[in-house]
Image (cartoon, rainbow, N blue to C red):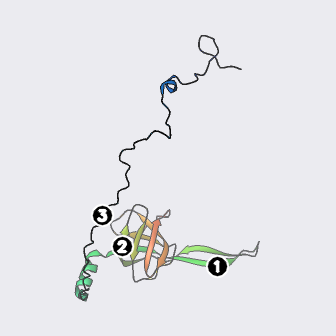
Amino acid sequence: MAIKNPDGTPYRLQSPNKIMKTQQPWNDKEKVVVHNMTAEEEEEKPKPEIKIAKPKKKIEPKKEAIIEKLNEVKKSAYCLPAKYEEYTDTLYNEIKKRLTYGSKFVFEIVPIKEGDLTYEFWSDKDISTGSIILVFGERRWWKVVESKDKVFTCYPSDLTPSFEE
């Protein structure tokens, strides 16, 4: 089926291009001049000598200053510790883990990174994965998902227990 113009006549491709009739072809016999395409070598500038400074002795801050800084940064938080109990499924005879929570307690934390979807803190307590954390003065509950060298990474928790007494 032919493609047709709006008036009903068959559509015809334009060929050859009318501009090509007036264009002059390049001949190898003619010298073609190309501007700004010269391959001039740039002069290498001498590089300045780099003086390497010897490292000075490291100045360690005093322990009192470190403790004072930690006291400014540390916060208190509630914790609902998670406990995993293993049990054997009687129907399929498989070993499964059940998550239960212990009694709540208050402990000290040092926040490392606070974000909308992650929270990292350091604590001297051993907190198991799955525990629920609520930092004093905040409205978001966090669930511990990873712990490495007493640095705990948390994600928002779907469980929001009451820590009121």
> How many marks overall?
3
Residue 86 in the image, given as x and y percentages of width and height: 64, 79
Q: Is the residue 19 above or below the residue 85 in the image?
A: above
Q: How many neighbours does mark 3 have within 10 angstroms: few (below 14), some (14-19), or many (20 or more)?
A: few
Q: Secondary structure at mark 2?
A: strand
Name the foreground residue: 114 vs 52: 52
Most foreground residue, 44 or 121: 44
Position of residue 62 in the picture relative to residue 28 (left or right): left
Q: Which residue is mark 1?
A: 86
- Check disc 2: other Cα within 10 Å, few if <14, some if 14-19, many if 20+: some
Indicate which disc, 2 or 3, sits on the residue closer to the N terminus.
3
Q: Residue at x 52, y 24 (%)?
A: 21
Q: Alpha-carbon distance for marks 2 and 3?
A: 52 Å
Residue nearest the viewer, comparing 34 with 52: 34
Label 3 close to label 1 by CB (< 8 Å): no
Drawn side of residue 159 relative to residue 119, left or right: right
> How far is the residue under mark 3 from the one under mark 1?
76 Å
Q: Amino acid at mark 2?
A: Ile
The quadrant holding residue 67 is: bottom left
Tag shown at residue 112? 2
The residue to which callout 3 is attached is: 43
Percent across and percent down for residue 41 are: 35, 60
Above or below, comparing residue 134 to residue 7 in the picture:
below
Residue at image position (36%, 44%) is 35
The answer to which image quadrant residue 72 occupies is bottom left
Q: Residue furthest top?
A: 7
> What SS does tag 1 mark?
strand
Q: Residue shown at 24%/80% (left/top)?
A: 51
